[in-house]
Amino acid sequence: MGSVTATVASPTGANVTRWFRTFSAIVASGFRRYATYRQATMAGAATNSVFGLLRYYIFLAAAGATGRVAGYDRAQLATFVWVGQGLLAVVLIWGWTELADRIRTGEVAADLLRPVHPVTSYLATDLGRAGFASLARLLPPVLIGLLFFDVYLPRRPATLPLFALSVLLAVVVCFGCRYLVNATAYWLQDVRGPLILWTLSSGVLAGLYFPLGFLPGWLEALLRYGTPFPSVLQIPLDVLVERDPAPMQLGLVGVQVGWAVALLVLCRLVQRRAERRLVVQGG
Amino acid sequence: MAEHLAAYRALLGAQARSQAAYRTSFVVDLVGNVGATVFDVVTVLVLFGVTRELGGFTLRETLVIVGLSSFAFATADLLVGNIERLPRYVRTGLFDAVLVRPLAALPQLLLMDLPLRKVSRAVFGLAVLVVAVGSAGIDWTPARAALVVVAPLAGVVFFGAVFVTTATVSFYWIDSGELANSVTYGGRDFTSYPVTVYGGWFRTLFAYGMGFAFVSYHPALALLGRADPLGLPAWVGWAAPGVAVLAAAVAGLAWRVGIRHYRSTGS
């Protein structure tokens, strides 16, 4: 029989349909779980609005009298800020320590006994969470932008579907990063260091504090191709505001696909290494 | 009184020892905390990379505002910021334990978990302030020399009052979560830029409704000897510390009313 960890090859006879059904069941339960935190959702939406206003005025001031900066006009900056505030909660850039907590307490042992690979099941839960967040957290700031500000609406018919795909990929990329940061708990007793590093670098390098176009061109390119951060926020937002011509838009989503695949593969590798050395105390 | 002080000192000493016990974690925290404030300053520098002025202010002038804001926020966060945890204490019932002890609730809460790791941030904020004030070409007078000392301290009191006031919301609404952050951290971001940057009701609400304009913007104008582009008279910059006293009074009132309203969650 061999060992019973989830990373051992699945028994023969498992087919794609069954895998897909399990995956969507986990997605749905993730959606329901996060839909129960209603008050926190409301408070979060209010907070996003305050920070949206702050960033909107600051970026607009950077655009100055000409109203153009780094390839964005005022309306594009408005869309960038308001959709960005909502996207922040959809990709859940901060505050996810569930895996690290479960590793520390040993509860992760239960995850390893399930017949679904932990990376797969956590990803499915996260997609369900993101689905709920895109209704409850993305819509309010987008509505505020539409109602009260002069926002940029995409002009190319392909942009909206491409944006939807780009957001999905951003969730996967962000999940991959968070999983890796959390997985350091297998080796370190205290994950605060990696967590702080991620929190600091993600905010500034993903394009939240300022659009990365404000940086010198070579630095922006280095970040975009050399790190996963811009794939988390900056790329979906650039796709939506059509900052680049259509072929480049497509290329940006291609960069995200690359990062998503690379990170998921890395997550599985790390998980396999970790299971070799995991010792759960007690019993 | 003396025995109370001894009790508080014991609480603080226990905190310091327990935090220093995990040395690597403590160093990581020190570095991580300073990082957040460094990035705030970097953001300002990046913005000035694409524009020569922000809301009519040059980089040197804006840095005085940034320095006042980051020193005031970081120091208040170090001393009082822990009150952010009040919602958790209320939810878990720990707050009941605090109330039955023969010491005042507020100082206990603050000392129970004084985050010494945040010292690095306050020191960095002070460094930014010193460099900014030194390079802004201020025309020094005795009054300005007094203001450059009083204004940052008043800012600390003001942000401290904001932390306490927003935390009292959790006496009424336990799951308010991030809402307090929108005023505390939102206030920090707001005070990092000249208020001329903002517009409409948002500026009126944050700058004058909540009083954030008096933390860094008006004192900076007085230090730099600039007239307010928004038309307020010059003496406002000198009166700014008075707003901090007012804010502290409001916070004290909100805290007492909140405690009286508090009913244990029963957990």
Image (cartoon, coloured by chain):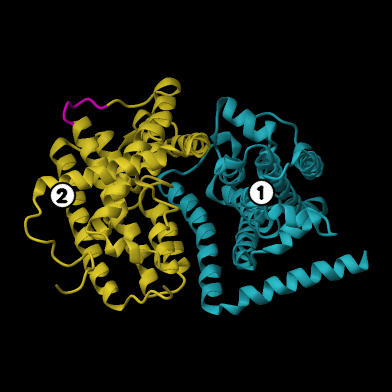
The yellow chain is: A
Q: Amino acid at mark 2?
A: Trp
Q: Label 1, on which residue?
A: B90
Q: Which of the two residues, A56 or A180, is positioned nearer the viewer here?
A: A180
In the rendering, at what x and y percent does residue B211 appear?
A: 70, 37
Asked whether the beta carbons under mark 2 and mark 1 sit within 8 Å of each other, the answer is no
Asked which quadrant contains residue A138, the reply is top left
Quadrant for the N terminus of chain B in the image: bottom right
Determine crowd level at label 1: few under 14, some 14-19, many 20+ residues with C-alpha closer than 10 A. many
Q: Position of residue A60 (x, y in %)?
A: 44, 34
Describe the element under mark 2 as helix, strand or loop: helix
Q: Which mark is residue A19?
A: 2
- How many numbered marks have been drawn onto this rendered protein structure? 2
| Nearest the eye: A231 or A195 | A195
**Chain with cyan colouring:** B
Q: Is residue A12 above or below residue B65?
A: below
